Image (spheres, rainbow, N blue to C red):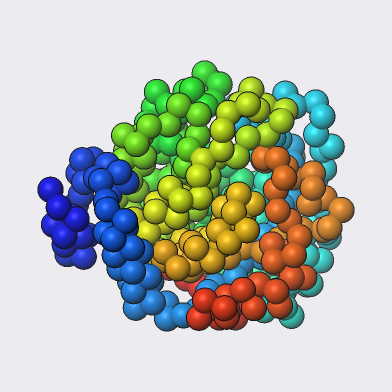
Amino acid sequence: MTFTSVLEKLTQRLPLTGEDFVFLLTGLTPGEEQQLYAAARSTAQRQFGNRIFIRGLIEISNLCKNDCYYCGIRKSNQKVQRYRLTKEQILSCCEIGYPLGFRTFVLQGGEDGAFTDDWLCGLLQEMKRRFPDCAITLSLGERSRESYRRLKQAGADRYLLREETADFAHYHRLHPAQMSPQHRQDCLFALKELGYQTGAGFMVGSPGQTVEHLAEDFLFLQKLQPHMVGIGPFLPHQDTPFRDCPPGTAAQTVRCVAILRLLLPGANLPATTALATLDPKGRQKAVLAGANVIMPNLSPAEVRDKYSLYDHKAHSGAEAAEGLRLLQRQMEEIGYTLCIDRGDSR
């Protein structure tokens, strides 16, 4: 196996094996690694030019019924100041974001039982009425197929549901026994079947993760063929069972971004907040490895530090909607520009 032969399989859209992915993650020389980044960057530029799509992230609730061992808003964390935005607050965030150039709004939250289908459908219909040229992404966890169908009918365009890890044994190390990795994957395939632009993703460097686990993540995404993949390094939170575990690395995360760009040329790949939290230059490094999306925070300022999935989460400066000028300068420094566009997957 050589780098040239594996790269040729990627460029010819031939399926890769687990061994191919392990090789890309561990077997490259420094020179071959730079070739990987250059190939990924060239692929992204052929698809999207030097444009970076922006999404307005609105974190609508930090209440969650789940107790994932890595997550700062897990159900059993009694130290979290819980909140839930009203419809009026969410619509106000959109009113602020629209004139700034946002044409996609991402509603993200824990699995909060207050968000019934009726409630969400009413919100989606009003958002589409006020902002008909905008896309709406939901990231609200596992729901029934009928719920996904209703939300799609009410106006949701995209749905982001990270599988976190495709290896079932590893999944159970990160989640309570009542959570099912098969059900999570079934939700992703249901979303695709219902016509959503579907987003998946995984953590890099999560506790117990091996390079073989990462290879399984790539094999799963190769099968799913999602429209978006959001990945970021594992970052510990002080009030979780994994508080003392080391974080993932920026270098491995950026390499995974490059592999994903070559595996899924037309997919939207965010340069994530977790990566920017770990490495001040992480966002730029991800873009130069093929990422094409950034999601500044549009949430009300008073709740941003309450949506704390991991410690020291970045939510100001270039991470915030009001920091778009700073973000634009950062992108211009590496030859890219922010664009006003829905930014649909190709």
- Position of residue 183 measured from the top left corner of the image (x, y, whole percent): 44, 32
- Position of residue 80 measured from the top left corner of the image (x, y, whole percent): 80, 34
- Write the residue at 74% across / 80% down: 99
- Write the residue at 46% across / 80% down: 50
The one of 44 and 280 positioned closer to us in this rendering = 280
Taking the image as shown, residue 316 lies to the left or right of residue 228, namely: right
Query: Picture quarter containing residue 64?
Result: top right
Outermost residue, front direction?
30
The one of 30 and 148 positioned closer to us in this rendering = 30
Query: Picture quarter containing residue 94?
Result: bottom right
Taking the image as shown, residue 145 lies to the left or right of residue 61, namely: left
Res. 10 visible in picture: yes
> Would you place residue 44 above or below residue 142 in this image?
below
Outermost residue, top direction?
177
How many labels, in total? Answer: 0
The one of 111 and 249 positioned closer to us in this rendering = 249
- Write the residue at 82% across / 50% down: 303
> Would you place residue 115 above or below residue 14 in this image?
above
Taking the image as shown, residue 131 lies to the left or right of residue 178, namely: right
Query: Picture quarter containing residue 257?
Result: bottom left
- Write the residue at 27% across / 51% down: 28
Res. 341 visible in picture: no
Outermost residue, right direction?
302
The one of 190 and 47 positioned closer to us in this rendering = 47
- Position of residue 260 measured from the top left corner of the image (x, y, whole percent): 36, 56
Image quadrant where one finds the C terminus? bottom left
Taking the image as shown, residue 25 lies to the left or right of residue 163, namely: left
> Would you place residue 71 above or below residue 92 in this image?
above
